[in-house]
Image: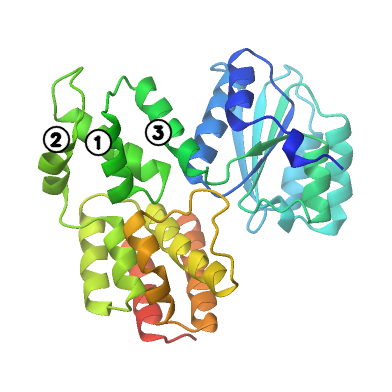
């Protein structure tokens, strides 16, 4: 079995991709959606180079026969294809051996991206997949790496920010790389080009952009304050905060509460919570019993699935779940 400690870092793998050192199969394991999407776009664009197609499969919903039929298909013109396969753990036993056999001899015209929200190498199937591919770790990074990634994406967009200003953005929006970077990008659009973002600029502009921040929704949900939670969610929704970001933020809150109950107070990376919420975690935990926290996580996962499979409005998806969680009502 390969040990994860011997795996190259995400940054090293991206540098290899940029140098045209492409693998035929990548296992992208971890739940940081921003890093996940970034890597998928980087390696897909490099492989296709403007030609070919992307094929998307989610193994909870899509036909396994269709996926493996496509993998077995030969193209007369060797058209390049990127297979983006989510939740490979859901593949039935009937097709698992077929996938493992394919990984032993992948087609050069295909690029497989196997994406698991879980980084679970104790699972025999996921471990076998990772052993036959290039493993890409897109778990939420450690705090020092978190800052490095934010700075990296800022430099790619030619955004300049002072160190103390970055620390403030992390304090206010540090539940994900996406939130910090998106806030930074919004500020950069309303200031002069090449101007360095400082603390004064953040206080002046960020406060005008919306009434509430995502960490405040985490706080109100931690307190089970239903009225405030609905008000903040409505404000976030009206001001363009995407539902997947909100779901991730709330999931991070309840995941940390579960780990705290289990006696694991040490984070294994960026927790998705800023310093304000982290300090209050013990108080929030007292408002919930373990079953309520697990039910909250299950309902948030259902909401995430609904965003991908239905045309329901964001309010209709999440508002009933907020009510259930705050009132402790579950079907």
- Earlier residue among tags 1 and 2: 1
Q: Is residue 267 above or below residue 131?
A: below
Q: Tell me what residue is drawn at x 17 percent, y 39 percent.
A: 202
Q: What element does badge 3 sit on?
A: helix
Q: Are marks 1 and 2 in contact (CB under 8 Å)?
A: yes
Q: Tell me what residue is drawn at x 40 percent, y 33 percent.
A: 150
Q: CA distance from mark 1 to mark 3?
A: 12 Å
Q: CA distance from mark 2 to mark 3?
A: 18 Å
Q: Quadrant of the N terminus?
A: top right
Residue 214 image offset from top left, x and y in percent: 30, 57
Q: Are marks 2 and 3 in contact (CB under 8 Å)?
A: no
Give the residue at mark 1.
Answer: 165
- Which of 265/2 is in front? 265
Residue 294, quarter of picture: bottom right
Task: Specify whether residue 313 is in view.
Answer: no
Residue 331 image offset from top left, x and y in percent: 49, 86
Q: CA distance from mark 1 to mark 2?
A: 9 Å
- Left or right of 125: which side holds 270? left
- Earlier residue among tags 2 and 3: 3
- Left or right of 248: which side holds 128? right
Give the foreground label among 1 and 3.
1
Give the residue at mark 3.
Answer: 150
Q: What element does badge 2 sit on?
A: helix
Residue 20 image offset from top left, x and y in percent: 65, 13
**Count of numbered circles in the view:** 3
CA neighbours of label 2 inside 10 A, class few (<14), some (14 to 19), many (20+): some
Give the label on residue 201, or none.
2
């Amino acid at each position: 079995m390969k040990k994860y400690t011997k795996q190259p870092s995400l940054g090293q793998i991206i540098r290899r991709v940029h140098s045209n050192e492409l693998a035929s199969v990548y296992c992208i394991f971890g739940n940081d959606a921003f890093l996940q999407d970034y890597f998928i776009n980087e390696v897909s664009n490099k492989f296709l180079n403007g030609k070919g197609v992307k094929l998307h499969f989610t193994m909870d919903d899509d036909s396994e026969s269709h996926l493996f039929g496509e993998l077995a298909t030969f193209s007369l013109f060797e058209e390049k294809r990127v297979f983006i396969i989510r939740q490979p753990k859901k593949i039935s036993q009937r097709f698992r051996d077929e996938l493992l056999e394919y990984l032993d001899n992948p087609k050069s015209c295909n690029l497989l991206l196997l994406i698991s929200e879980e980084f679970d190498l104790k699972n025999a199937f996921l471990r076998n997949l990772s052993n036959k591919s290039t493993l890409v770790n897109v778990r939420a990074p450690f705090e020092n790496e978190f800052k490095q990634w934010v700075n990296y994406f800022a430099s790619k967009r030619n955004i300049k920010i002072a160190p103390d200003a970055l620390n403030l953005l992390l304090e206010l929006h540090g539940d994900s790389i996406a939130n910090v970077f998106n806030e930074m990008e919004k500020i950069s659009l309303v200031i002069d080009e090449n101007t360095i973002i400082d603390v004064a600029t953040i206080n002046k502009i960020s406060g005008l952009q919306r009434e509430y921040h995502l960490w405040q929704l985490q706080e109100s949900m931690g307190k089970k304050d239903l009225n405030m939670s609905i008000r903040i969610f409505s404000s976030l929704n009206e001001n363009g905060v995407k539902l997947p970001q909100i779901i991730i933020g709330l999931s991070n809150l309840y995941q940390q509460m579960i780990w705290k109950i289990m006696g694991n107070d040490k984070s294994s990376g960026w927790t998705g919570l800023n310093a304000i919420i982290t300090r209050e975690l013990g108080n929030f935990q007292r408002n919930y019993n373990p079953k309520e926290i697990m039910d909250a996580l299950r309902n948030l996962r259902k909401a995430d699935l609904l965003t991908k499979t239905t045309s329901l409005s964001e309010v209709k998806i999440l508002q009933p779940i907020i009510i259930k969680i705050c009132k402790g009502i579950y079907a």
